[in-house]
Image: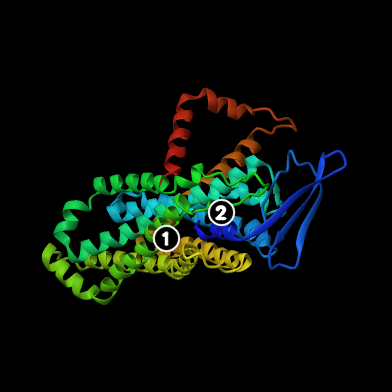
Amino acid sequence: MSTTHSTHDATDHVDARFIGTGNNSNATLHYDYYNVDHYFTYLDYPIYYYSHYFHIYEFEAPIYGYLWPALVFMVSGSNVLVVLGFLRKKMQNPTYLLLISVAISDSLAGLVTLPGMFHVYLHSNMLLTKEWCIGLMVSRHYISRAFHTVSIWQSLLLVIYRYLFLCRPLVSRRWCNMRNTFVSIIVIYVLGFIFHMYHAFNIKATDDGFCQWAIEEPCVQTCVYIWFSLLFVHLLPSFLGLFITMPIIIGINKAYHNFTSTNSISSSAEEQKHKILTKVVVIISIIWLIPEIPYGIYYLIVVGQIHNGQSIFPLEINRKIHLSYEVAVIISFHCNFWVYVLMIRRFRLALKRMFQFTTCRNAQLSESADTASSTNQGNGLDLPSVNNLERVNDPQRVKTNASDDISNTRF
């Protein structure tokens, strides 16, 4: 979901050759990284079908093949509950609308990567068709990265909203409404996909038989994209979010004193509700910044080395750092759910009602099935009994039974 993974593939010096065998229908692929003492050899793969090599390290296969899908499904399942819980009428305000949108973008950032992850990492499939190579690269470097960027920008907007709500209540009342928030979310989604449009047209299936992001020489368009991605996806949002969050943490009590006096809120319960929501936003901001700030600094070092023509870290180290970042990001997505559960009482009540409704419906369906089964069995034959036929033909009984069923669904 970030940029340096492919950059390292592109800047690492490789020497690859396809050597035909016999009738040229099969080939041996020699893949040699300079300064690495081993290379990989594959036999009996048709060149015309398995034509592009995607390098996988041993530590990547179990994490991306097994752990990553499990985390993505866990995040997506919990975010479904987040969306259903925050869509309640009593929880419809700009802050909750942004939290819903963040949950959706977080889930989609992981889900779009699963087909490629299953195909490549689950069975350590390093030789890919051109179609699979393009699908893997587009899903990871364009679509997933766009959704992740949307999540980052929405998290920043969430912090800005809360800061205005506390410190600039008049500005917040004018601009931070449901309509403007919805429009802002749509604009962020559009800008996120436009921002990473470079990856939609940059072909990663190279002519020399590799599946990687290759940087052109001289580096012009790619370097422009890398610098923009560094500044507007990682560094500026992270440090701006930190800069806005710190005053909220330090002066939250003073800010609420000014807020309540400005808005004439006399209800302590209402004040407590707003204070809890602010704390939720602050905690979510901290969770978002924990993986982003270190990775942004690391990314700055790598981009600076590329720009100055210096040798960067070895590919294996870059892959380990990138993998750690992605796992940390997907875990941070799931942490948001538990923040809502632990701190927002209305969200807990909404979840409780949803689970109660599901349990009651299952119990009613099971009871109805058992009743129908017992009454329809007579003399060992699955035939309706006389009493059942009488009840069906009796309009008054039908009406009574219908009213009983309706009354049983009320809680």
Q: Nearer the viewer, residue 266 or 28?
A: 28
Image color mode? rainbow
Secondary structure, mark 2, is helix
Q: Identity of the amino acid at label 1?
A: Leu
Q: Which mark is residue 230?
A: 1
Relative to 289, say whether 89 is above or below: above
In x, y percent, where is residue 224? Answer: 42, 54
Height in image: 252 above or below 212?
A: below
Q: Position of residue 295 (x, y in %)?
A: 47, 67
Picture coordinates of residue 174, whole percent (x, y) = 16, 52
> Marks 2 and 1: which is nearer the front?
1
* Residue lying at the far top of the rendered structure: 393
* Residue 288 placement, left or right of 135: left
Residue depicted at 57% across the width and 52% down the height: 214
Q: Secondary structure at mark 1?
A: helix
| Residue type, numbered disc 2 | Phe
Circle 2 crowding by C-alpha within 10 Å: few under 14, some 14–19, many from 20: some
Instruction: Give coordinates of residue 114: x percent, y percent.
Output: 59, 49
User: In the displayed structure, does residue 189 sit left or right of residue 173?
Assistant: right
Work out how far the residue at label 2 is from the one at label 1, CA to CA, in angstroms: 29 Å
The residue most toward the right is: 22
Judging by the rendered image, the residue that carries numbered circle 2 is 73
- Say which label, 2 or 1, has the lower sequence index: 2
